[in-house]
Amino acid sequence: MPNPLLDIRIGTMVRANLEDPAAYVRQILPLGFESIQPFFWQTLGGKDLARLAGEIEEAIGDADVTVSSIGMFGNPLESGDTDRGVLDAWKTVIDNAHLFGTTLVSGFTGRIRGKPLTDSLPRYREVWGELARRAADKGVRIAFENCAMDGNWAGGDWNIAHNPDAWELMFNELPNDNLGLEWEPCHQLVYLIDPMPQIRKWAHRIFHVHGKDATVRWDVIREHGVFGRLPFVQMRTPGFGDSDWTRVISELRLAGYKGAIDIEGWHDPVYRGDLEITGQARALEYLKLCRGGASYLQNPA
């Protein structure tokens, strides 16, 4: 009988730019991760995606673990050499997502650097209109990460998809059904936005969820304000931040979300370095508990 708990899998991100991502996968799977999201930063680094897909499949073996999506993070809207490489990488990842057993690719929208967010919309429509059609032809969906990367409405370097007002503009420009969001509460808390109402409003566009949280330091805000000398918010691993993930997962389930929550590590100021995987393992346990537990119990007949 299918396990309805696994309608929402709890997994983690895997750096695909590592020399041997499959070796990393073999090391972490015994911890109980149910999905993985291999991701690239700005370049495929010469990786043969067919070979990488095969190596990851072999590393997973008989384990009930899925590849939730492939991440490609960079700025495909600009015209520098690296940026053009990001755009080419997006095309390659879209074309090869099926080799990993996934139909979802995620990353930043990109942005015209140093300009107001709205100045990026014409280029966004041009680039992502073409990529959305390319993806649709292959049965692939695209999820835009909601991280501002220190940008805002007035300027930035990486991404316009960090603000719900921007989402309205983006999906008005391109209402394609295969364009959505890679959502997490952390990036909303960084801008003091309540993440919970967003799930109810935007659930139809949430294609993937990152397991990352934040702690808002209200004492700092009251004394020093926001975006000042002292950091007013800390990015946290789930279980150590402000979000009630029981509510988050409940709202996702009520909205019909089926997919993965993949833990995004390497940001927590406490559980990092030698404590990185300790923190991720704790987040895995915590998120499974918030989901309803690790084991599905069938109702009595």
Image (tube, helix red, strand yellow):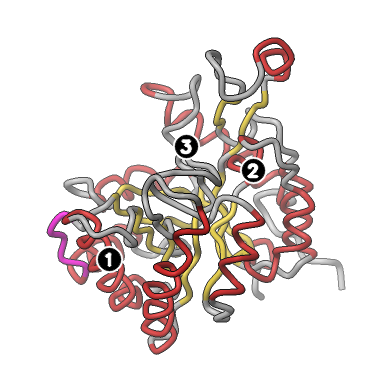
How much space separates mark 3 and mark 2, taking CA atoms?
12 Å
Disc 3 marks a residue whose amino acid type is Asp
- Which quarter of the figure has residue 215? top right
Q: Please give the name of the residue rendered at 68% of the width and 61% of the height, measured from the top-left corner.
A: 5
Query: In screen coordinates, is 277 left or right of 185?
Result: left
Question: Which element is circle 3 on?
Answer: loop
Residue at mark 2? 188
**Image point (70%, 48%), residue name:** 293
Task: Say which quarter of the image contains residue 265.
Answer: top left
The amino acid type found where label 2 is placed reads Gln
Q: Which of the two discs, 3 and 1, labels the residue nearer the N terminus?
A: 1
Bounds of the magenta segment: 45-49
Image quadrant containing the N terminus: bottom right
Mark 1 and mark 3 in contact (Cβ < 8 Å)? no
Residue 172: which quarter of the image? bottom right
**Which badge, 3 or 2, is on the more N-terminal residue?**
3
The quarter in which the C terminus is drawn is bottom right
The kind of secondary structure element at disc 1 is: helix
Label 1 CA crowd tier, 10 Å (few <14, some 14–19, many 20+): many
Q: What secondary structure is the magenta-colored segment mainly?
A: loop
Crowding near the residue tagged with mark 3, few <14, some 14–19, many ≥20 C-alpha atoms within 10 Å: few
Say left or right for 166 vs 87.
right
Q: Which residue is mark 3?
A: 150
Who's the residue at 25% across and 50% down the image?
Answer: 21
Q: Position of residue 270 (x, y in %)?
A: 50, 19
Residue carrying label 1: 87
